[in-house]
Image (spheres, grey):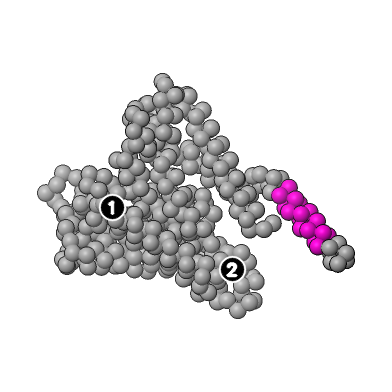
Amino acid sequence: MENKHLMAFELFRGLVAILIAVAVAFIFIILCAEDPGEALNCLLIRPVVSNGALNTRSIFTILGRTTPIIFTGLAICIMFSANQFNLGAEGVTMLGGFIGSLVAIYLPMAAGLHTFVAVIIAAISGGIVMLVPALAKVKLKASEMVISLMMNYVILNIVLHFLNNVFADRSKGATQTFPFELTAKVGTVVEGTELTYGFFIAVIVTIFIGIFMFRTRWGYAIRMIGINESFSKYSGIKVGTIIVVSQIIGGLLSGAGGAIEVLGRETTFRWLDLPGYGWTGVTVAILAKNNPLLVPLAAIFIAYLNRGCELMSIYAGVPAEMIDIIQAVIFLFFAAEQFLSRYRQKLVVKEAKNELNEKAKSQMKGENA
């Protein structure tokens, strides 16, 4: 099947999965909501239109909330493209936010430079930590999925230990660090909204990752390993090195995303649990079919649903956890290889017949000439 037909099929498949997810959500909404119509309005329309007018504040909220899941989505895309099922983006995002916060508090610098240094140190920290599952996979043949999953909770408890016992501001009633220096803050685009300049940084990073994955030999090697690791090995690609590199890049992106999120939307570090951005990043990567250029669109879609579920919980009495049900159904159908496989097979057969007919027509024209 030609790439354009394959892309059309994947778009159709994705749309059907989303519609099924919304249909499943609607069943639960009927069971939970007193007014299902208002609940659906909150889920599908109210995030962008309220009382007949464009809800710009809600739109800025949606865009602002995409920032961390764009970074984790990109991280997961790169690692999944190399067939590495590393789930460490969740813990590394928290670590990046914590390291970035410490730089923002204890290393005063000039405005702009301070933010840059905090994000870079957080990114490097994430890359170093992600070496653990990467080297365990390459050197010990251990499962990167199991190690990275366990590593999330190791990171969580290490961060909480230092937050509680070393860096906590004891003058506050809640567990949190001292306030960040203003020079380290990621600026807000529109005051009073959640949209920070981190969103535009995420879009720029997406473009660079797209170029890296589709226009460089390193990106080609990552994708080739994901397609066929044995062929990659025999064609001269250093498979072990590329596997490690792909996971380090995932760590760099996750760590940077955590720092940008905390320095943009918080004034102190107060995460007492894993933030959830890494898990959502898995859904984003699956929706984007491991194409980094589609990650922002997938992230906006998830953030849109998240905002809709939040509004449902406020105005229609539907639990905000509805987003977890929707994401789970989308994940299920996107991950199911046999979902709409017959339709895909029909497209392949149709395309093959069209090619044969075109060749036959060309041959007849050549004979007549």
Q: Quadrant of the N terminus?
A: bottom right
| Residue at the limit of the structure toward the bottom, as seen here | 236
Residue at the location (86% across, 67% down)? 369
Q: Position of residue 245 (x, y in %)?
A: 46, 71
Name above or below for residue 209 compared with residue 310. Answer: below
Q: Position of residue 178 (x, y in %)?
A: 16, 55
Residue at the location (51% across, 53% down)? 288
Q: Is residue 346 magenta?
A: yes
Q: Is residue 333 left or right of residue 160?
A: right
Label 2: which secondary element: helix
Q: Position of residue 320 (x, y in %)?
A: 38, 35
Q: What kind of residue is marked 2?
A: Met
- In this rendered view, identify the residue nearer to me: 31 or 3: 3
Q: Which residue is mark 1?
A: 196
Residue at the location (44% across, 24% down)? 37
What's drawn in magenta, residue-wise? 345-362
First in residue order: circle 1 vs circle 2: 1
Q: Main secondary structure of the magenta part?
A: helix
Q: Position of residue 65 (x, y in %)?
A: 35, 47
- In this rendered view, identify the residue nearer to me: 121 or 68: 68
For the residues labelled 1 and 2, the Cα–Cα distance comes to 36 Å
Label 1: which secondary element: loop
Q: What kind of residue is marked 1?
A: Thr
Q: Which residue is mark 2?
A: 224
Q: Nearer the viewer, mark 1 or mark 2?
A: 1
| Residue at the limit of the structure toward the right, as seen here | 367
Q: Is residue 321 left or right of residue 266?
A: right
Residue 96 shows up from this direction: yes
| Residue at the limit of the structure toward the front, as seen here | 369
